[in-house]
Amino acid sequence: MNRLPQITLAFWVMKICATTLGETAGDLLSMTLNVGYAISSLILISVFALTLITQLMAKTYKPLLYWIVILSTSTAGTTMSDFMDRTLELGYATGSMILIAILLAIFAAWRLSGDSLNVTKVQSFRGEMFYWMAILFSNTLGTALGDYLADDSGLGFAGGALLIGSAIGVVVLLKYFTKISSVALFWVAFVLTRPFGATLGDLMTKSHEKGGLDFGTIGSSAVLAGILLVMIVGASYAQKRYGKQQVAELT
């Protein structure tokens, strides 16, 4: 049941690209197309459910399918966070605290279930379900944190991206120079890449007056989708090549 990728540098580059695309694509649906946060959330959660079912039915790791599910969690997380923070008027700080509590509850239930939180050892259906729930709510939390840093903290989009990028750099140093649990650091990094993508996405799409680069949601989404697609094609090629090597070693 090895349906998950290896955790490499390419994985993190693709994760940041996918989460940034999730921010711009989510805003494209809810704001540019004026669908609204509530309807957008329902649509994107439905897409997430359909892609997740397909992922769970797969017998092996399929890069295109896996990253489509990641992208669906990112876009759904964007609109879910915006619905909580803006439509329900909870605010970014309160929304973030609620999502932190939900995410901690998921990790607690996951650990109590007996399945490992180590993503390289997820082998059961139950473990993978916890994995995807953690990803969905970590992406939702990341959006709220990113919006808080960009809008409420006074840092702006570029300042928020720089702060989160620095925090990710600290996590990398802790990984290689301390004995802190690699599992804990993975999930901290996974959460942090989402606000990094959120602030980066806002920096790309927002107008110059708001401190952005004014590329727009459509243009930014197209560029990011192209980059992610190229990397997925590369990952698919590497996966096929690795599979052929394994067959050759067994024959």
Image (spheres, rainbow, N blue to C red):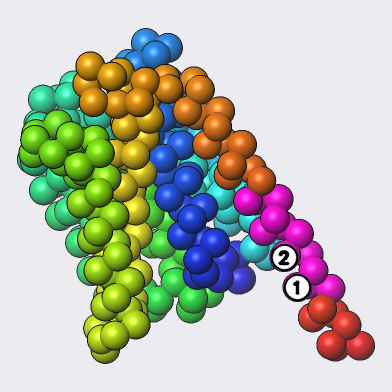
Judging by the rendered image, the residue that carries numbered circle 2 is 239
- Front one among 196 and 28: 196
> What amino acid does circle 2 point to?
Gln
Query: Is 226 located above or below residue 39 in the figure?
Result: below
**Label 2: how many residues lie within 10 Å, few (<14), some (14-19) or many (20+)?**
some
Which residue is depicted at the point 66% across and 46% down?
230
Which residue is depicted at the point 84% across and 87% down?
249
* Quadrant in which the C terminus is drawn: bottom right
**Residue 233 painted magenta:** yes
Query: Is 75 located above or below residue 182 in the figure?
Result: above
* Quadrant in which the N terminus is drawn: bottom right
- Front one among 190 and 59: 190
Q: Residue furthest right?
A: 251
Q: Quadrant of residue 101?
A: bottom left
Q: Quadrant of residue 166?
A: bottom left
**Residue 99 painted magenta:** no
Image location of residue 48, percent across then percent down: 48, 40
- Front one among 216 and 102: 216
CB within 8 Å, label 1 to label 2 = yes
Image location of residue 8, percent across then percent down: 52, 69
Q: Is residue 83 left or right of residue 135?
A: left
Say what secondary structure mark 1 lies in. Answer: helix
- Front one among 116 and 243: 243
> What amino acid does circle 1 point to?
Tyr
Say what secondary structure mark 2 lies in. Answer: helix
Q: CA distance from mark 1 to mark 2?
A: 5 Å
- In magenta, the rendered stretch is 231-244
Q: Is residue 106 left or right of residue 51?
A: left
Judging by the rendered image, the residue that carries numbered circle 1 is 242
